Amino acid sequence: MPDTDLPIRAATETAIAHGIIPDRCDILQNGSTLVLRLTETLVARVVQDTSGPRQGTEWFARENAIAQHLTANGAPVIPLHPDLPPGPHEHLGYPINFWQFVTRIEAEPEPREIGRTLRQCHEIMSRFAEPLPHLAIITESLQILRDRELFPHTTQQMLRHRLEHSMEVLNQYPHQPVHGDAHLGNLMNTTLGLLWTDWEDTFSGPVEWDVASAIWNAQILDEDHATVQAVCDAYCAAGGRLDAEALKHSLIARAAVMTAWYPILYPQPNAERQMRLQRRIEWLRDQAGD
């Protein structure tokens, strides 16, 4: 795990500079991003991987803007903390933003609520007026694969081909602001209901990208087709529309994106992560006709 002393100092000193005195320092997550609970209501997110592919505060600035828009329009999201300027902040070289603490409950999210709340976010995001990068996580992942030798040559080439072809297909569909990383780890079941979080990957793309991100594990790893159908049905019942071809290529591109990022996010993966990585690669190889 990264040494957390300096990023903790960066977060606490930033809070103090804005008149908030931390009374605790509970580490909620420690990875490329450090998540800290500093008071009863205040949570800080600190980017620890300051030498990684993403530099500066551009990603956090987009996240803050879309989070403010969603919160102001009643979307089911975790809000930025109201007692600090939205930022993003930067101190001691670490980008930081601050969020309202919410209480998680143990119950698993209902698949229909996943689809309904994602559609609610999409409907509100469709009215977001600021420009967003086009298919950002896909183009970013392609650049990573061009710049870094992360896999054996044949695997690296296969990943690039899958991303290039799926991006070509997805360019043919309507685009709007989307979450960008709408896997279920970014959906919290709380005492306030299901709330989406972690908007730093937001970009302009087909809505099918987010749906694919939400159902990927259930569809490909778990083969839980009932859950997949319930999520998709609820999304459409709430007013959304899903194109089967766009969803298929979103699933392919999502798998390739996650594979490209794995060596960066998990440089020393445990056995379960290694197994999941291998299953993604094998599944992608089987998409040869796409």
Image (cartoon, rainbow, N blue to C red):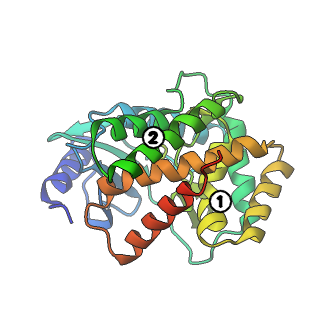
User: How crowded is the residue under tag 2: few (<14 C-alpha within 10 Å), some, or many (20+)?
Assistant: many
Mark sitting on residue 265 = none
Q: Tag 1: residue type?
A: Ile
Determine which quarter of the picture holds residue 4. bottom left
User: How crowded is the residue under tag 1: few (<14 C-alpha within 10 Å), some, or many (20+)?
Assistant: many
Q: Tag 2: residue type?
A: Arg
- Nearer to the camera, 233 or 160: 160
Tell me residue 190's x, y (percent). Answer: 58, 66
Question: Residue shown at 13%/53% (left/top)?
Answer: 6
Badge 2 is on which residue? 160
Question: Residue shown at 61%/52% (left/top)?
Answer: 287
Question: Residue shown at 57%/51% (left/top)?
Answer: 182
Mark sitting on residue 215 = 1
Q: CA distance from mark 1 to mark 2?
A: 23 Å
Determine which quarter of the picture holds residue 179. top right
Question: As drawn, is 161 to the left or to the right of 234?
Answer: left
Residue 24 can be seen, yes or no: no
Q: Check the picture and name the quadrant holding the N terminus.
A: bottom left
CB atoms of marks 1 and 2 within 8 Å: no
- Nearer to the camera, 18 or 256: 256
Where is 80 relative to 225, above or below?
Answer: above
Tell me residue 134's x, y (percent). Answer: 53, 27
**Secondary structure beneath label 1:** helix
Question: Residue shown at 61%/59% (left/top)?
Answer: 216
Front of the two marks 1 and 2? 2
Tell me residue 175's x, y (percent). Answer: 66, 29
